[in-house]
Image: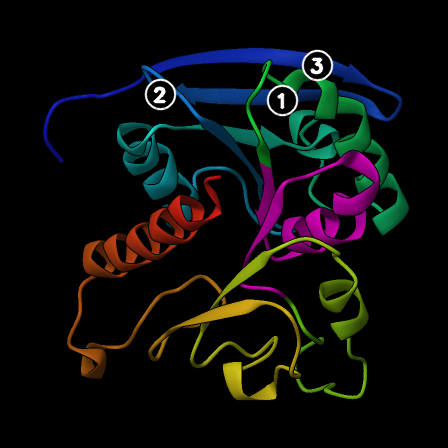
Amino acid sequence: MGAVTHSETVETVETDVGQARITWAEAPAPWAVLAVSHGAGGGIGARDLQGLAAALPARGVSVALVEQPWRVAGKKVAPAPKTLDAGWRGLWPALLRPGLPVVSGGRSAGARVACRTAAELGAHAVLALSFPLHPPGRPEKSRADELLGAGVPTLVVQGGNDPFGKPEEFPDGAYDLVEVPYGDHGFAVPKKAGTTSEEVVGTITDAVGNWIDGLRE
């Protein structure tokens, strides 16, 4: 991975639905902020989130790994979407840095939150990792309206074998989509993929970094 190119700090933020926590991987001379939250079944230790925090500061992007209040409180089950959105709104001011655009993101349920709140919060763009297009086996329960309604430039990074929505299931729309071949909802790949988990994370971080670079004005 080379030398450490960022500093890390942790802060807590009070919201109307409890205390959130932000782990910052600060770029030495940032031009943008990427704020990403976890899904309903995991935390900020997810490989893709950790990979972004390790790689993007060297590209001038400070990364904020956000733990929603329910997770900080030690609860096992995520609350209703409106509560997740309330937590995100409450911590948003802590993500703002003078003159720096904020890319709002997350994986799975966190991606849905980012899409639902992007326009009202003034997010510069949205990063949707493993967007849960529908519950497994229930394609009729589509959440495409959330993705299509983000209202800002959006990148979806989706596993080729994600039971919550394979890339070919996604509707046409004004967003970019990067496929992780053979990847499941957590971007794990089988041996037949011929790639290691480290290579997969590298591919994801490169794709996200290049996309964010393309947002630079």
Spot occupied by residue 96 in the image (x, y as percentages of width and height): 64, 20
Asked where in the image residue 143 lies, by quadrant, the reply is: bottom right
| Figure colour scheme | rainbow
Q: Residue furthest left?
A: 2
Query: Element type at marker 3?
Result: strand
| Mark 2 surroundings: few (<14), some (14-19) or many (≥20) residues within 10 A | many
Residue 69 position by quadrant: top right
Q: First in sequence, mark 3 or 2: give its number.
A: 3
Residues at marks 1 and 3, CA–CA distance in whole angstroms:
10 Å
Q: Amino acid at mark 1?
A: Leu
Q: Is residue 48 magenta?
A: no
Which element carries disc 1, helix, strand or loop?
A: helix
Residue denoted by label 1: 95
The answer to whether residue 63 is above or below residue 210 is above
Q: Which mark is residue 27?
A: 2
For badge 2, the amino acid type reads: Ala
Q: Nearer the viewer, mark 3 or mark 2?
A: 2
Write the residue at 74% across / 68% down: 148
User: Is the N terminus in the top left, top right, bottom left or bottom right quadrant?
Assistant: top left
- The front one of 45 and 132 is 132
Q: Measuring from the top left, give residue 93's x and y in whole percent.
A: 73, 19
Magenta stretch, residue numbers: 103-131
Distance (Cα) linking label 3 and label 2: 21 Å
User: Badge 1 local density, few (<14 within 10 Å), some, or many (20+)?
Assistant: some
Mark 3 or mark 1, which is nearer the start of the sequence?
3
- Residue 106 covered by magenta stretch: yes
Q: Residue at x 37, y 33 (%)?
A: 53
Q: Position of residue 10 (x, y in %)?
A: 50, 13
- Tell me, yes or no, whether the two marked residues, 1 and 3, touch with CB atoms within 8 Å: no
Marks 1 and 2, how far apart in space?
14 Å
Q: Which residue is the site of mark 3? A: 13
